[in-house]
Image (spheres, rainbow, N blue to C red):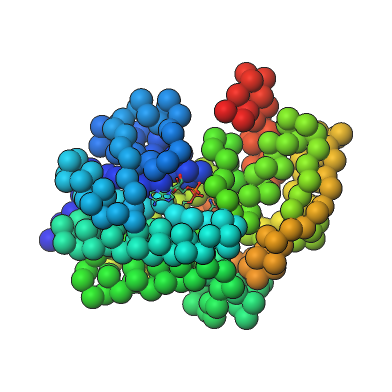
Amino acid sequence: MLPKAMTRMLVTGAVGQIGSELTMALRERYGHENVVAAGHRTLPGPTLRDSGPYETVDVSRRDTLEAVIEKYQIDTIFHLAAILSAVGEQKPHLCWDVNINGLYNVLEVAREREMTRIFCPSSIAVFGCNTPCENTPQDTILGPATMYGVTKVTGELLCNYYHKRFGVDVRGVRYPGLISSETLPGGGTTDYAVAIYYEAVANQRYTCFVRENTVLPMMYMPDAIKATIDLMEADLPRLKHHADYNLAAMSFSAGELAAEIKKHIPDFEVEYKPDFRQAIADTWPRTIDDSTAREEWGWRPAYDLAAMTTDMLDKLTARHLRGDLYR
Ligand code: NAD
Ligand code: AKB
């Protein structure tokens, strides 16, 4: 039997850091009218709003999700709506409600409608203090220390259960911290690695909320988008894992990141004032073993720290000169 095709797609959390870029990449690839962007409370920018269908969905309310799926006859969902680690520690109940009840609604609708495929991202936040922190293996101790991490582990288990028990083709990666030049991140621990570029361009100064020697796994957004589409287009029989692929591109300390930016902006100064997010960062791995993703679906990143920094600074400087850096 031929695999079912991905023809009508819904992106939840489409106004967020990943969604705003993934939606545009999907529209380019599969046709603008075939990719419905679903936002929540934050208003979309004109590019996202005007380049294809746009709707409002609260994923924790199944009726709002189902109405859009019915309206557009959706067969594939990229489920990005979530509460991230830092906001999740401040609002743990909301984090559970959105990340778990939202995902459950998506999986149930997918099961009932026999949808083609679901993408649900996980995170390096599934790991914890007892996880090996160097070259963290694919299958290892999890034990997250945050509500966000608890929801991500639960999400992985739920997705893998829906695949095994009901045959729902649900796939996902454990993204590292993502760095991007289009949309600011929405309240995570790795947000400093994005903010540092914006402030370097705008003010040549940045106050960093983790210590200088804090090392975390990171990835540039074009690689994250490519990984997402490659995994969703991979042949199902090749996949031995489903919703929990380790994914890596680069690891660096906050100090190494600042030093790389300083090569381009010599006057750039960074001060380090760790806050509550330091304790979260301290429970996450420093480097990740992503050999399973490389073997099972051919994952390979293109950007390292130097290439990413050149591209980020080019893009943000152009926006700064146009006066829309913090639009
Ligand atoms: P983001 O915070 O930028 O975007 C998430 C979006 O979800 C927001 O636009 C928000 O308005 C929306 N949302 C919140 N509550 C909602 C609700 N009840 N109904 C519908 N939408 C709601 O997050 P992101 O960085 O784009 O992350 C997307 C996914 O990728 C999440 O699952 C996140 O855990 C995962 N992830 C992201 C990173 C990263 O560094 N960005 C790393 C690892 C994993
Ligand atoms: C966060 O810091 O919460 C996210 C993530 C790594 O999941 N960027």
Please indicate whether residue 132 sits to the left or right of residue 57 in the image: right
* Residue 11 position in % (x across, y down): 34, 45
Q: Is residue 296 above or below residue 65?
A: below
- Closer to the camera in the image, 105 or 236: 105
Judged from this view, the residue extending furthest toward the left is: 1
Judged from this view, the residue extending furthest toward the top is: 322
Residue 125 in view (yes/no): yes
Please indicate whether residue 75 sits to the left or right of residue 245 in the image: left
- Closer to the camera in the image, 316 or 58: 58
Q: Residue at x 78, y 31 (%)?
A: 203
Q: Is residue 325 above or below residue 164?
A: above
Place residue 263 in its image quadrant: top right
Q: Residue at x 51, y 43 (%)?
A: 17
Please indicate whether residue 174 sits to the left or right of residue 70 in the image: right
Please indicate whether residue 186 sits to the left or right of residue 310 in the image: left
Q: Residue at x 57, y 40 (%)?
A: 184
Quadrant where the C terminus is found in the figure = top right
Place residue 49 in its image quadrant: top left
Q: Residue at x 52, y 68 (%)?
A: 147
Quadrant where the N terminus is found in the figure = bottom left
* Residue 251 position in % (x across, y down): 67, 58
Q: Is residue 227 above or below residue 161?
A: above
Q: Is residue 26 above or below residue 47?
A: below
